[in-house]
Image (tube, rainbow, N blue to C red):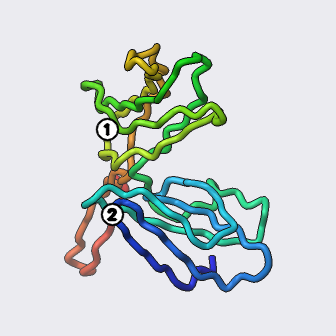
Amino acid sequence: MTITAYETIRATSITTVIVTSDLAGTVYFHWYVDGVYCGVTQSNRRDFFVDEGDQVRVECVDTTDAGFDAIAGAPAGWPARRLVWWVRSLEADVDQYRVEQSQDGGAWSTVGIVHHRDTEWEYSILTGRLDDLSDYQFRVVPVDRAGNDGAPVLLESERIVRSPDAPDFAIAYDAGTDKVTFAAA
């Protein structure tokens, strides 16, 4: 990674990130928000929607390798968000998609609305921050022009583990040698 500078410009809820790279030739910029892969550009600038008062960690990996594996080459860290992805509904009168999440089996709450476009086949939305050690279920509800809900599509549930448990170990002190020994418990 040869990113040498980050510049961030915020106007209302749009944050523009501009990076400077030492690489020459065709450069591919792989963008991550809180550890979640958001896509690749050949431009060194990208706009992100960030709610007022919210903060995110934007990282960029630059490479000249067109075959770069963005998941295996992701920056270190545990993601606190998820990219929810789905394929369009085939119903003729869909106006929008309501994306909802349930935390630990609780009530469904709306995390975003995405408007349907006849030219789009797939959609995605980046969730807000997710709590560590919680189970999340996501669903996408197509909504028609009259405001009626269609059949929701349930997505696979996931347990968020950003901070793994600390290892268990035992400490022993030997007064005769004045040594401390650590051992797996």
| Pick the front one: 45 or 102 | 45
Q: Residue 134 shows which numbered tag? A: 1
Q: Which residue is at a point 38% across and 38% down the rendered structure image?
A: 112
At label 1, which amino acid type do we have?
A: Ser
**Residue 103, relative to residue 77: is it above or below?**
above
Q: How far across and down, in percent of the image, does residue 39 sit?
A: 61, 55
Would residue 167 be found to the left or right of residue 89 on screen? left
Q: Is residue 95 above or below residue 173?
A: above
Q: Classify mark 2: helix, strand or loop.
A: loop
Quadrant in which the N terminus appears? bottom right
Say above or below: 120 vs 164: above
> Residue at 53% of width from left, 32% of height from top?
116
- Image x and y of residue 96, in percent: 46, 29
Q: Looking at the image, which residue is at 35% across and 47% down?
A: 128
Indicate the quadrant where residue 149 lies: top left
Picture disc at residue 12 = 2
| Sequence-earlier tag: 2 or 1 | 2
Helix, strand or loop at mark 1: strand
- The image shows residue 68 at horizontal and vertical percentages of 73, 61
